[in-house]
Amino acid sequence: MKSKIAIYLAGSIQKGHELHESYWSHNEMEILRNHLPDYLISFLNPAFRSDDLSDQHSVFGRDMLQVYCSNIVFVDARNRRGLGVGAEMMWAKFNSIPVITLAPKNTHYHKAETSLLGVPVDNWIHPFVESLSDKIVETLEEGTECINQIFNNPSFKIKDINHVHDAMRHYQQHQLDNDLPMLDLISTNSELYARVTRLMSDAS
């Protein structure tokens, strides 16, 4: 008997004021089904709907509900994405839901080499994509292999909201002393100083 799973397909939906090169297609959903024959898959897709799109609070609620109900969030990051995808990824981590991100090398969020503020960086992955993804894959097929690992390998560790706290502490321990603008802000704002100090005390 097949196991039932729900996959939330995060990405772009067609909007009149935006142009994107990739969307989750019916063909791609069939590829996922064909490569996951042991599962009965329900696709939660924000592009498939008949609710009132002029009710923006409800639109937000629907998307957050679908993420919340999913077993996996699969992110299409082949092209530049909007605010919603990042929020969906963070909401997934808040609820300990696995996130797989399709970001082939030398696409918008994954570069063999680039520069940030004039500083060359090799093997760059957008920090939010890297930190909020449990796995970054190059192909749909690689993504299905990862889904099988998540469900069949008990040792596969899923990032949760603690990963965000750990990242803040990592910055504080390893980079804050080198970050002169941030040090200056902390030294002149007692509230900022208290919050940074509290972060470290919460970890101990």
Image: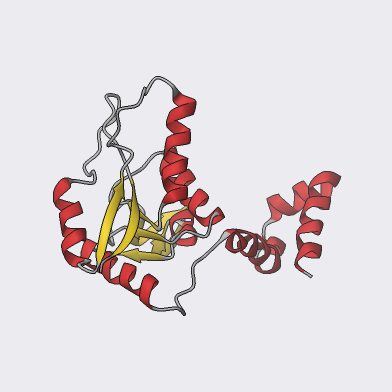
The residue furthest front is 1
In the rendered image, is residue 117 in sight?
no
Q: Which color scheme is applied?
A: secondary structure
Foreground: 37 or 187? 37
Whether residue 152 is visible, yes or no, is yes
Q: Is residue 154 above or below residue 193?
A: below
Q: Which residue is painted at 25% across and 33% down in the image?
A: 19
- 55 relative position to 39: left or right: right
So how many labels did they put on this image?
A: 0
Q: Nearer the viewer, residue 113 or 18?
A: 18
Quarter placement of the N terminus:
bottom left
Residue at the outermost right position: 190
Q: Position of residue 129 (x, y in %)?
A: 43, 56
Residue 75, horizontal then vertical, whole percent: 35, 52
Q: Quadrant of residue 13?
A: top left
User: Image height check: is 70 above or below 155?
Assistant: above
The residue under the point 27% across, 56% down is 41
Tell whether 48 sits left or right of 182.
left
- Could you tell me which residue is drawn at 43 percent across and 63 percent down? 121
Residue 134: give x, y in percent of width and height: 43, 65
Identify the residue at image location x=35%, y=62%: 113
Quarter of the view holding residue 149: bottom left
Image: 63 above or below 117: above
**The C terminus lies in quadrant:** bottom right
Front-lying residue, 38 or 19: 38
Q: Is residue 74 left or right of residue 92?
A: left
